[in-house]
Image (cartoon, rainbow, N blue to C red):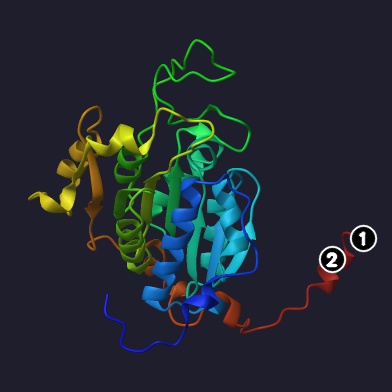
Amino acid sequence: MTILELKFDKKIYSTKVRPLWCPGCGDFAMFKALKEALYELQLDPKQTILVAGIGCSSKMSDAVGVYGLHNIHGRAIPSATGIKMANHNLNVIVYGGDGDMLGIGGNHFTHACRRNMDLTLIIPNNHTYGLTTGQTSPTSDIGYKTKTSPKGSFDRPVNPVFAAISAGATFVAKVSSADNKHMGKVMTAAIAHKGMSVVVIDQFCITWNRINTPDYYADKYFDVQETDHDLSNFEDSLLLANMTGDRIPFGIIYHTEKVKSFEENYSQLQGKSNVERRSRQLIDVSDMLDSYI
């Protein structure tokens, strides 16, 4: 993206808070990539909010120099939805891990996608519950062993890319925390998209998950942008997203502008935001309230 006018310096997107992540954690790379995306788009920090859930990655809301809301487990998306409905002119980014967004928050994930909310959802997927010392998550591979599943997980893992496309998101991508530059470019495109954007990041947990490492994916990834794949083809994108095993798609997998965002379908959300409007008529309800006292 070419920046025509720089209003905001890179430093403005940082705070004095240094997140407490393990040395070498993929969250540091995502932190850098997200700030780079905000800078590339020159988003006003006062008009941008980062809504996070619970988990290692969700400490991001304290460290990025925009408004932040640290939510309860699995409830970042409904809070972000309320924020967007109250002021649709805000840039709303939702941040949470695979356990937060696809486990306890899985229902909210599905409905936000089908509504095509104008939100950017970033999901660091480390295939484990890192904050609580490495239990299986909704995306853990079959056979993945932990202290609470010593014989290995037998649950089939959720495919977040496939789930997002099938539910109705209109921008869906898969990136890696080992490729900071590429990750920043995809985040930039996702935030700029009008509609539900989902960026799934293979994020490497060096403390608890010694299986899904950068080396594990190195020979499996193939860049979708280097193929003849039509990003707007829903069926083909689903087939591509469902590829696992020795060949894993990487990059933007689905992107369409043909579907209106949730906010564009409502005349009440055009022009001024709800927080800027005042009621046309003030109604005195004191008599009605007195009748119940």
Q: Residue furthest right?
A: 293
Question: In which quadrant of the rendered image does the N terminus lie?
Answer: bottom left
Q: Residue furthest left?
A: 228
Q: Are marks 1 and 2 in contact (CB under 8 Å)?
A: yes
Where residue 163 sits in the image (x, y, percent)? 35, 39
- Is 69 in front, or is 108? 69
Where residue 56 sits in the image (x, y, percent)? 58, 45
Amino acid marked by disc 2: Leu
Quarter of the image for residue 256 reads: bottom left
Q: Residue at x 25, y 46 (%)?
A: 250
Quarter of the image for residue 232 reads: bottom left
Determine whether 211 is above or below 85 in the image.
above
Specify whether 185 is left or right of 21: left
Q: Residue at x 84, y 73 (%)?
A: 286
Determine whether 65 is above or below 182 in the image.
below
Where residue 280 sits in the image (x, y, percent)? 61, 84
Specify whether 39 is left or right of 172: right
Question: In which quadrant of the rendered image does the C terminus lie?
Answer: bottom right
Where residue 189 sits in the image (x, y, percent)? 31, 64
Amino acid marked by disc 1: Ile
SS under mark 2: helix
SS under mark 1: loop
Q: Residue at x 56, y 75 (%)?
A: 274
Number of disc labels: 2
On the image, numbered disc 1 is attached to which residue? 293
Q: Residues within 10 Å of mark 2 (few under 14, many from 20)?
A: few
Residue 289: mark in rendering: 2
Q: Is residue 230 visible?
A: no
Specify whether 290 is left or right of 221: right
- Is 38 in front, or is 110? 38
